[in-house]
Image (cartoon, helix red, strand yellow):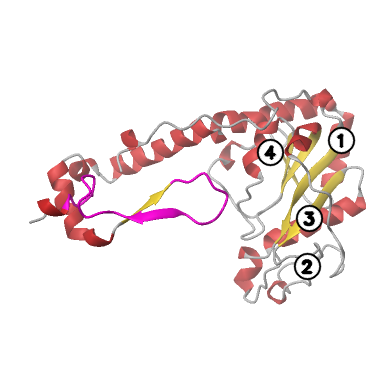
Amino acid sequence: PHPRNIPPAAAPRPAPNASAVPAQAERTRATALWRGSLNTRTATQPSDCYFRSYGDHARIAAFSATRDAPKLVNASCVKQHGGGECVVPPAPPACRGLIRNFNSGLKPGDAVTGARAEILDYPRHRYLLNLPGGFTGSYSKNGNHVWRTGAVVLWWVAPFVEWYHPALQDFSNYIVVARRSVGPIVQALERNPAAAAAIGRRGKQIHDELLCGACLARWLKTVLETVRRELKFDEILDDEAEAVRFFRKHLPCDDLVEVLPALTTTMQMQWHKVSSDDEGHPCGPRRSRR
């Protein structure tokens, strides 16, 4: 694809009634907030322990930290995949010998359900936890919004890296935490509100400069332009006739589908088969392929 043909990114949508980020002093709740789900999928292979179960391990550790210091940490589950009340699952067999004390002192069957947090609850908190994803133990959708709030982002330790992580500086624009450290860190920040406010302000820059809608579009455009330049795509793609010959040689021209963007939270993508007579067909319309 030509990067110049990528449409401008839509302006990021603000959270309801949250156009102005509150000052740290206006955040009345001095606990580290997290709400989310437990995956509880069975891990049978050693690799599953990291690819499937690390997210649950981190989340259960946060629940344990909440029990240790409920006035400092407020992490709980609002949904368990498969339905029913959120309870601590048995430690996965695949994790034996790999993760010691998988359930962080909690027992299988312990209830970890908490009240659901509404979108406007987050700006009221001075500290927001970001935990590893429940399905893969890596990317978490929660990170999409914690950076924009101006709260101190408390990033649960995790063995993965995302593209913007080189910009993160511990105790400068975020803080890495774990089960035993999250409570004492919140306590220390409460004793130094100026430092907490500065970390929150610098953390919001991660959203404003790297993760906003226009920022992501700019990053994607830069990546595509770099790939295009290094692989010399222009030698074929900038010559329409040459591009059509290339696609006819390498593509199943009668079996192409187009994936459509959709404003949906479901995992189902919308798509349709590209008509062979479509003027925009990469192989050219059928009538020109004779």
**Which residue is label 4 attached to?**
146
What's the amino acid at mark 4?
Val
Compared to residue 274, the image places residue 164 above or below, namely: above
Residue density around tag 4, few if under 14, some if 14–19, many if 20 or more, within 10 Å: many
Q: Quadrant of residue 19?
A: top right
Q: Quadrant of residue 148?
A: top right
Residue density around tag 1, few if under 14, some if 14–19, many if 20 or more, within 10 Å: some
What's the amino acid at mark 2?
Arg
**Which residue is label 3 attached to?**
77
> Of the residues under marks 1 and 3, which one precedes in the sequence?
1
**Which residue is label 1 attached to?**
30
For the stretch drawn in magenta, the main secondary structure is loop
**Residues marked 2 and 3 touching at CB (< 8 Å):** no
> Of the residues under marks 2 and 3, which one precedes in the sequence?
3
> Of the residues under marks 4 and 1, which one precedes in the sequence?
1
Rendering coords of residue 206 (x, y %): 61, 33
Q: CA distance from mark 3 to mark 4?
A: 17 Å
Q: In the drawing, what numbered circle is on residue 105? A: none
**Which residues are drawn in magenta?**
261-285
Rendering coords of residue 203 (x, y %): 67, 32
Q: In the drawing, what numbered circle is on residue 100? A: 2
